[in-house]
Amino acid sequence: MDVQAAGSTFLKLAIELQVKVLQKLGLGDLTRCTRVCKQLRSLVTAATALQYKMELERAGMVDGPAEVPLPVKLEKIRARNAAWDTAFPLHVVVQPPPRSGFVPSLPGGVFFRLGTIGDAWTLHRPAWPEVDTSGGLEDRSISLTSHEISTTGMSSSDQSSPCAVNPEEDLVVFVKGRSVPDGIPQCVIISIAQNKIDTSWTSQLVFSDLETPVMDFVQSVGDLLSWSRINVFYSAGQGELRVMNWQTGAIVWRSLWTTSGRCLLLDTSHVMVVDHKGLFIYEFDPHTSASIPPDWATEASCLLHLEFPAFGVPDPDIMFLRTHEPGARYFRSDRPFFREDPDITVLAVYFNCLYGHNMEDLILVIPLATIHARLSQPQIHDQQETVRVPWSDWGPDGTRLLRLARQPNYITTWGSRVAISLAPPRSGLDRDVFIVDVRPHSRKDSFGGGAQDVPIAMGKSDAPIDASDTMSVQSFAETVTTRLPYRMAHIKACLFDVPNVIQSLDGRLTHDGMVFMVSSRPG
């Protein structure tokens, strides 16, 4: 084939056809097209549709349902990319904290405020449509009356609190934080729009007697809830894990885990347990009858086991293991300009380990695409026994390991990004916030330049994060190599000019950037 002749023929097509063909290409190929000839360069740089596609891929996003002119979307996504590239905020918005200072946040960019004991909970999804980087969402603030919750015996004084939000299904899950007397539900579901309890289901589950203190982690996807009741300290006791269909009241999967591992839903028929040995993936029937409880799942009964590197410290020296589920959730009525690309969404697993008299803090960033690629292989479902995949066969090219200089205050994930907030060595009103963007090898071109550049905004970091390809860490028995492409940005978040601030708290990623929580003096 005469490549030169083919190129000449392509350039003779109508401009609309040329753009339509080029829209099939990715960012890397489109960038290379600009180096072929002046005519092609002019076409790529002038076509709004092609520029929008390139900016979306650079941002790790896909087009949204908003019916607005394409030039408006292009302007917004360019402003957003400029902010991420420089790590310098284009807009800073300060909002007064609630009276009680109690503001739990949940994955998906949703916050809950409780003024004082007995007051109503307020669901808040912050957004700033007036700023240049806005994704087109409207700010939402919805009061959930305490009367609806207290009628079940789950008043705020009983330590009940929101544990999961499912904006797509218009619901919030409230869980009671301590032992439940007979007749009082363990969990209720509140309809956000109707501001009332969904009477089709409440839970009076009886959990095993786990040693206190315990924590509840709840995830809501469609008609399913994943519920992990685990010990605060990782190796101190077992965890009880369940997946429930709240529409039918059926427990569709369950396990008594030997450590405080956590379960997460991968989709409507697969659940994943994360502990220090790796990722254990199970298949379940979401339509299981409520009258026939499933067998207790064990490590040996999983469908797929993706092993982590072997630890070089004893199990009791793994002090904490936290799994941070992917963020980015939307209400059905939302019409964003663009939204996070689900194909590059990441999971973050945090380890805090003791060796000698020292502590080590590590985060393993895992794109869900890495897990789904293994799960989709035909032989996985054909085997009668667990398919075990050693770390060396999937980890080095499917993850990115981060070593932190200090224990993090807070970790959030959003699309392909992980935000890590580190406090200064001594008490202070500033935070080192690192935003690490990790993508599969197939999306390496979306980073453009050098993947390991660290833009610095608002001050130099005194708590660097090591993201080297190869690391010798104390927690693992052997040197660990991870090669996924990444970019890292750093923000020195200083709150000295905010009046009445006592202490700066944690930064959370949201739809329109990052929200920092502060505690303040009364009044």
Image (spheres, rainbow, N blue to C red):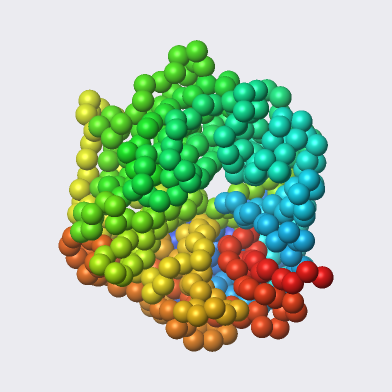
In the foreground, 145 or 355: 355
Locate residue 160, reporting x and y percent.
65, 41
Q: How many marks?
A: 0
User: Farthest residue toward the top?
Assistant: 291
Identify the residue at image location x=27%, y=47%. 277
Identify the residue at image location x=47%, y=83%. 461
Image-quadrant location for residue 76: bottom right
Image-quadrant location for residue 280: top left
In the foreground, 325 or 151: 151
Compared across the picture, whether 249 is left or right of 119 comes to: left
| Observer able to see residue 176 | yes
Residue 7 drawn above or below residue 86: above
Locate residue 119, reporting x and y percent.
80, 48
Image-quadrant location for residue 81: bottom right
Identify the residue at image location x=76%, y=49%. 117
Locate residue 430, reporting x and y percent.
57, 79
Residue 151 drawn above or below residue 423: above
User: Farthest residue toward the bottom?
Assistant: 459
Identify the residue at image location x=26%, y=62%. 475
| Observer able to see residue 343 | no
Compared across the picture, whether 315 is left or right of 176 comes to: left
Q: Quadrant of the N terminus?
A: bottom left
Compared across the picture, whether 11 is left or right of 134 comes to: left
Q: Quadrant of the C terminus?
A: bottom right
Locate residue 400, reporting x and y percent.
34, 62
In the foreground, 508 or 208: 208
